[in-house]
Amino acid sequence: MKSDLVIVYHRQPYQEVEVDGRIELREHSSPNGIVPTMKGFFGKVQRGAWVAWKLAEDTGAPDFEPVIEVSDSFGTYDVSRLPLTEEQVKSFYHVTSKEAFWPILHGFKERYNYDPVDWSTFRSVNWAFAEAAAEQATDDAVIWVHDYNLWLVPGYLRQLKPNATIAFFHHTPFPGPDMFNVLPWRQEIVESLLQCDSVGFHIPRYAQNFAAVARSVRGVRLTEDMDTPAEMLQPGVALNDRIMPLKLEHAGRPVAVHTSPVGVNFDHVERLATTPEVTEKIDEIRGSLNGGKLILSVSRTDYTKGNIEQLEAFERLLERRPELHGMVRLMLVSVGANRNMTAYQEVQARIEELTGRINGAYGSFEWQPVALIGQAIPLADLVAYYAAADVASITPLADGLNLVASEFCAARREDTPGALILSEFAGCAVLLEGAIPVNPFSHASMDSALDQALAMEPVEAKARMAALRKSARRWDINTWTEAELAHFDALRASHRPAPVAAA
């Protein structure tokens, strides 16, 4: 059965778990994150499909099922699984996407590595995604492609299904021309994106950067824009942009530029924070602090996430404020990813070195200043730490949005003091009112933010938290879902032929 909504994303919409020698498909335990968020759309359409890749060394194995039907709490939908060999995955994802695209998207030109890229493999994998999506889609379906490693899919889809409604959504930052145009494939990438009916971003700055890149590479004109809504601007934040582009014109056809920040399942996190198991865990954490304060930082292990800068700032805090020894702890959750990539191994080694140095220099038998957690924490436990912490410090050097900050807000009670230190270069910094903005490239800014957060009076902390929770709830998962569905309806309507006037 063909589908009304086809989601194209590199990851499968479930976890594969081996049980007694058999593979079971299980839903993700957390309601947050892009996979469960997108699966929520299947309950809003008559029939949905998902296209992803699956590691399969023998791509011609007779027992491999390229399309399976899945039924879970989100509904019943098809999953097209593209069999890729380990070598294809390495080339398409680890090399081209992570070593060439990722550093440019995040502004780390010095980490860009063009030499090992096999562009023909990237093209062929994107073509396979496009073919699978076209096969699943009804004639009037929305085909919704996600993220930078599938940049070429829209162009191929336009060849395969010329009348399709094609939408694309970026979950990373999008840089301006001076950075993006480092990519030697920029013309092919931009031309593909301009075959979309809509190209989506989390915040106005990324949308403006895309419009500038399209103008630079293809001479595309911006034909419609608007003032950025006040709720998408925060005082003094680096990623503010006061004009939001709405429409481009390319080769005589319009391309919508869509700005819509994804959110967390605010209500779920808020309810979870009040369950007996979590409240018991909160009391346990607070009791272990012996009247001291807890700073919490949660992210992946990645050079873009600012974990090293976070540790260095905490080390400077202990060096210049000896009265805090024994009275403040940093819990750094830095979950490893892409362990087979040298860049991430270097970051992990530096994090471990700094943690050991700080604990060795300042720790005692009774007090270890830094607790480093390298494994993913179950959501219920993480919510307990959000609720128990005095400060959340989220300081990426660059981040498309960052849902950890919003999860922290959802887990808090408005009448409980707590502070959020938030990098100006996280996309959510333009959305969350009440945070302490910080420039993670500045020692003075990082040091000042820590001092401010630790010294904040309860009245101010409660007022800030009330504002943070209000804005995090405003931009929750339901807001994003409703905005995207309305956008899909508008795109479909623009495809319908105008009614013929009566004679």
Image (cartoon, rainbow, N blue to C red):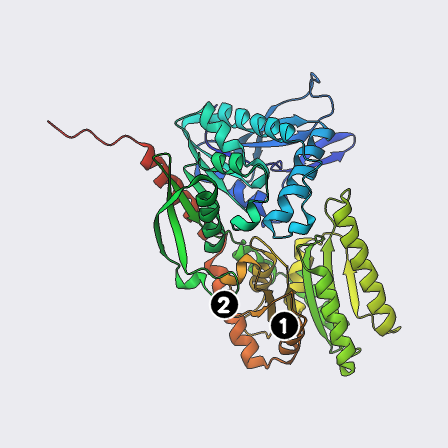
Other-residue count near label 2 (Cα within 10 Å), few / some / many at <14 / 14–19 / ≥20:
many
Q: CA distance from mark 2 to mark 1?
A: 19 Å
Q: Is residue 363 visible?
A: no
Closest to the camera, between mark 2 and mark 1, is 1
Other-residue count near label 1 (Cα within 10 Å), few / some / many at <14 / 14–19 / ≥20:
some
Residue 445: assigned label = 1
Asked if residue 213 lies left or right of residue 249, the reply is right
Element type at mark 1? helix
The correct choice, above or below, for 342 with respect to 384 in the image is above
Tag 2: amino acid:
Glu
Q: Is residue 483 visible?
A: yes
**Location of residue 456 (image quadrant):** bottom right
Instruction: Kindly give the residue lying farthest to the left in the view shown.
Output: 503
Tag 1: amino acid:
Ser
Q: Residue at left 68%, top 71%?
A: 443
**Location of residue 244 (image quadrant):** bottom left
The correct choice, above or below, for 137 with respect to 467 in the image is above
- x and y, in percent, of residue 358 in the image: 82, 69
- The residue at which mark 2 appears reads as 433
- x and y, in percent, of residue 45 in the image: 43, 36
